[in-house]
Image (cartoon, rainbow, N blue to C red):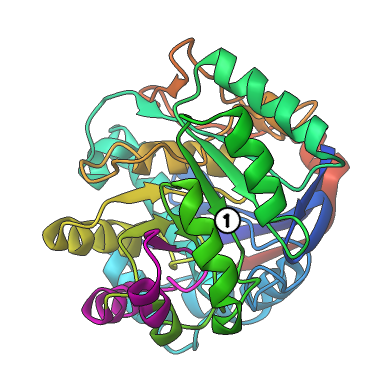
Amino acid sequence: MLIDSLDIYHVAMPLKYPWRTAYGVDYEIHSVLVRAKSGDYHAWSESTPLQMPTYSPESAAGVFLNLSEYFGPHLVGFDCETADDMNARLDLFKGNPFAKAALEIAWWTLQVKRQGKPLHELLGGAAREVSAGADFGIQDSFDMLLGNIQTAVDAGFPRIKLKVARGWDVDMLAAVRGAFPETRIHIDCNSGYSLDDLDLFKQIDRFRLEFIEQPLANNDILDHAELARLIDTPICLDESVTGVRVVEQALLAGACKYVNVKPGRVGGLSNAVKIHDICQDAGVPVWIGGMLESAVGSAVCIELATLPNVLYPGDLFPSSRFYERDLGQPEIELTERKTMMPFTDGLPEPDEELLQKYTLQRATVVVP
């Protein structure tokens, strides 16, 4: 499949409510969308590294620059029969998984149109409902958080995810666990702590969490393995998982008992499927994370969540959770069972009016 051209958009999508984490506050979500054209077909992808390099070393502006100036020109006009062919073509460039994912996911969505098959089928998934969890960033008060959790519990969400940060950790968890003694809960530290905080993590053991997501540095495996040996609560890796080899090393070191898979963070869907398979062989469950994408990117995460070793409710959100109006159409909806259905009649694509409204910069790459 020859990639004839790429249209690249850096967008900023305003949130209903600020998203607060250990690394800061986002008032809008910066994302990069790509429209790839091959012959008579075009398709969209989305990669969402956020505005600043705080979640990972990449940022939306940096991804836009790399795609428009380097990665895109190196790819356009090149024949990629498989996703692995595309990845091999991009191996020239070190790191930058979010930038590579924007192109690699577009290869898959083009295949959806070329082959007339649903994405989950191409990935090896099944046409089944996938379970969504409820996530809460750092709130204005404990009372506000407890009220929001109560609403989620009453609605039937199967688990609760809580962002934590220094000053919003042990006391917050004591309040939450006191109010919800039997609810499935895990916390996400977003790389905000170190092994010097061992006493804090031992205190957290008493709250009977499902796991602690990414407690230590984003580029660390060995310290996570050490922490896993010293506390009772299982560890889940997120930011540290940037590719297939990292997962192999993490499992060998005993650094985690769960893995969060995000297509953007691991360099695309081919790597995501390989990570799923490696973890399945090792008996380690995976689940699908999110970056507050529009429906364009969220739909891809839902398709990925149909794989058999996705055994924990994902960060899969209805469009109304974060946005007054989703850039991607049709919007993502949640069933009464707090599940989402994979897409059988095509994937969401950007609304042209909102795309123009939210675009900060745009570039087109064509064959010279």
Q: In which quarter of the view is residue 320 placed?
A: top right
For the record, the magenta segment spans: 225-253
Image position, residue 271 (x, y; %): 33, 65
Residue 3 appears in the figure: no
Task: Please state if 249 lies on the left or on the right of 291 as rendered.
Answer: left
Residue at the image position 36 percent from the left and 79 percent from the top: 225
Task: Please state if 82 lies on the left or on the right of 146 as rendered.
Answer: left
Residue 305 appears in the figure: yes
What amino acid is labelled 1 in the image? Asp
Q: Which quarter of the figure is the C terminus placed in? A: bottom right
- The answer to whether residue 91 is above or below residue 171 is below
Image position, residue 212 (x, y; %): 48, 58
Q: 66 or 130: nearer the eye? A: 130
Q: Residues within 10 Å of mark 1 (few under 14, many from 20)?
A: many
Q: Which quarter of the figure is the N terminus placed in? A: bottom left
- The answer to whether residue 175 is above or below residue 63 is above
Image position, residue 222 (x, y; %): 39, 86
Q: 197 or 296: nearer the eye? A: 197
**Residue assigned mark 1:** 188
Image position, residue 308 (x, y; %): 20, 41
Q: In which quarter of the view is residue 165 placed?
A: bottom right
Q: In which quarter of the view is residue 117 placed?
A: top left
Q: Is residue 244 magenta?
A: yes
Count the marks: 1
Residue at the image position 56 percent from the left and 29 percent from the top: 180
Furthest residue in direction left, as rendered: 281
Residue at the image position 57 percent from the left and 56 percent from the top: 188
Task: Please state if 289 lies on the left or on the right of 172 as rendered.
Answer: left
What kind of element bears circle 1? strand
Q: Is residue 245 magenta?
A: yes
